[in-house]
């Protein structure tokens, strides 16, 4: 299924110009080069050109938005390599308005695109207003959920997505990790562009912790615990026997539990309490719900735009969820470049050239 190709590597040479910021430890890379080199690195660790290109597109999309679910994934390229025995995602339990995607140990990004596209297609082709598609048996995280719900919303459906992941998050201080960062995302067709809301139910995303470690930065106060159960701002302490906190105390823990049930128990993935470890089982889950608004109401995009505009105009400092990410992405696309932590970029370049360490 997956074999290395040198074609992507050879195409990347024309994007060699970049600039380094010594004060921030980042390198400004052209968007084209980021896509090309990341795709080349993924091919070098075993993915075919199509799978590598799709994963690179999703990671660079996150990076363009300033989201920490982006190229930091390539900081540990061995984690992104194809799992032993992996195969293409396959559709199971299919009905006109539902399906289950068995990822067959392919990465979360490929499984999530398959499930999201199928959910949207089913909602649009059905006489009813709603469809649901889950995915399970993925070997890695799907990254930025906003990518998938925006993709669905651009097709005209309201999208709801939930994803569970291995045990990194404690339900409360002093507890052992039980949840993943368990993100929840919603995409809404609107004017002039979709409204997208994407949040981790943890106080910080796992890749936010990994990014802080890669940059040598401290974590914000109150987002993580050390192995002693006490708060820490040291990313290494959080990753080595510690835990991430939920956001907002019991409210965040409640939302995380809901996601664990919807994306874990209902998707076919590893079930908390029934396996020794979700992490070692490597069976992560996603659930995508697509709603066709035209089946329920007329002029939905205009109405959703009216609601968003009224909220935006309700005060002088109102920021709509997803607004900052959209503005960041527009600015970076206009400039044609994006900042990448130097350690992460060096890892991508090294992997593209040499593959994984033997």
Image: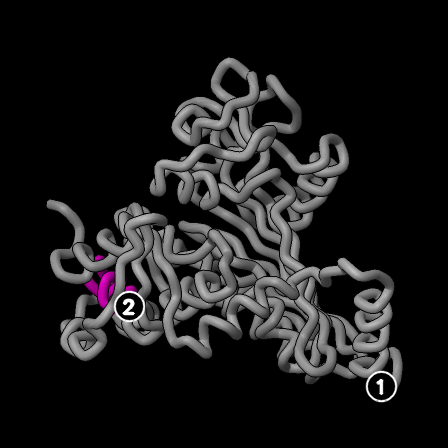
| Residue 235 coordinates in the image, percent (x, y) | 43, 31
User: Where 59 falls versus 157 (above or below)?
Assistant: above
Which residue lies at the image location 42% right of the left edge and 40% below the top edge? 212
Relative horizontal placement of residue 85, taking residue 12 as reference (left or right) = right
Q: Is residue 15 left or right of residue 254?
A: left
Q: Label 2: state its secondary structure.
A: helix
Element carrying mark 1: loop
What residue sits right under mark 2 in the picture? 39
Q: Is residue 84 visible?
A: no
Q: Position of residue 190 (x, y in %)?
A: 73, 78
Image quarter (top left, top right, bottom left or bottom right) of the C terminus: top left
Q: In this view, does 147 lie above or below 143?
A: below
Q: Position of residue 173 (x, y in %)?
A: 63, 21
* Residue reaching furthest to the top: 228
The answer to whether residue 76 of the structure is visible from this angle is yes
CA neighbours of label 2 inside 10 A, class few (<14), some (14 to 19), many (20+)? many
Say which mark, if any, is on residue 299: 1
Q: Give the range drawn in magenta.
A: 37-46
Residue 23: mark in rendering: none
The residue that appears at 43% across and 43% down in the rendered structure is 282
The image quarter in which residue 124 lies:
bottom right
Question: x, y (%) of residue 333?
Answer: 45, 76
Q: Which residue is drawn at 28% across and 50% down?
A: 22
């Amino acid at each position: 299924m997956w074999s290395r190709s040198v074609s992507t590597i050879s195409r990347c040479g024309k994007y060699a110009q970049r600039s380094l910021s010594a004060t921030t430890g980042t390198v400004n890379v052209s968007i084209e080069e980021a896509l090309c080199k990341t795709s080349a690195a993924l091919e070098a660790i075993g993915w075919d050109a199509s799978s590598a290109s799709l994963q690179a597109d999703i990671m660079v999309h996150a990076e363009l938005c300033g989201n920490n679910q982006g190229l930091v994934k390539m900081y540990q390229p061995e984690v992104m390599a194809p799992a032993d025995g992996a195969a293409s995602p396959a559709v199971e339990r299919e009905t006109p308005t539902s399906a289950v995607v068995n990822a067959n140990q392919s990465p979360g990004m490929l499984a999530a695109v398959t499930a999201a596209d199928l959910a949207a297609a089913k909602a649009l082709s059905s006489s009813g207003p709603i469809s649901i598609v889950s995915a399970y048996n993925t070997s890695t995280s799907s990254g930025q959920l906003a990518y998938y719900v925006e993709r669905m919303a651009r097709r005209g459906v309201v999208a709801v997505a939930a994803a569970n992941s291995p045990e990194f998050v404690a339900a409360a201080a002093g507890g052992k990790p039980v949840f993943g960062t368990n993100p929840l995302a919603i995409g809404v067709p609107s004017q002039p562009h979709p409204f997208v809301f994407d949040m981790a139910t943890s106080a910080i995303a796992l890749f936010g912790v990994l990014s802080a470690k890669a940059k040598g930065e401290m974590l914000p106060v109150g987002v993580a615990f050390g192995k002693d159960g006490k708060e820490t701002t040291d990313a290494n302490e959080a990753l080595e026997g510690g835990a991430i906190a939920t956001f907002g105390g019991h409210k965040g823990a409640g939302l995380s539990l809901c996601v664990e049930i919807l994306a874990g128990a209902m998707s076919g993935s590893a079930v908390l309490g029934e396996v020794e470890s979700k992490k070692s089982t490597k069976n992560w889950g996603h659930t995508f719900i697509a709603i066709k608004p035209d089946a329920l109401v007329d002029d939905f995009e205009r109405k959703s735009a009216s609601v968003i505009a009224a909220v935006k105009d309700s005060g002088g400092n109102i920021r709509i969820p997803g607004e900052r990410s959209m503005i960041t992405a527009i600015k970076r696309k206009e400039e044609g470049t994006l900042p990448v932590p130097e350690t992460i970029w060096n890892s991508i370049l090294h992997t593209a050239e040499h593959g994984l360490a033997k």
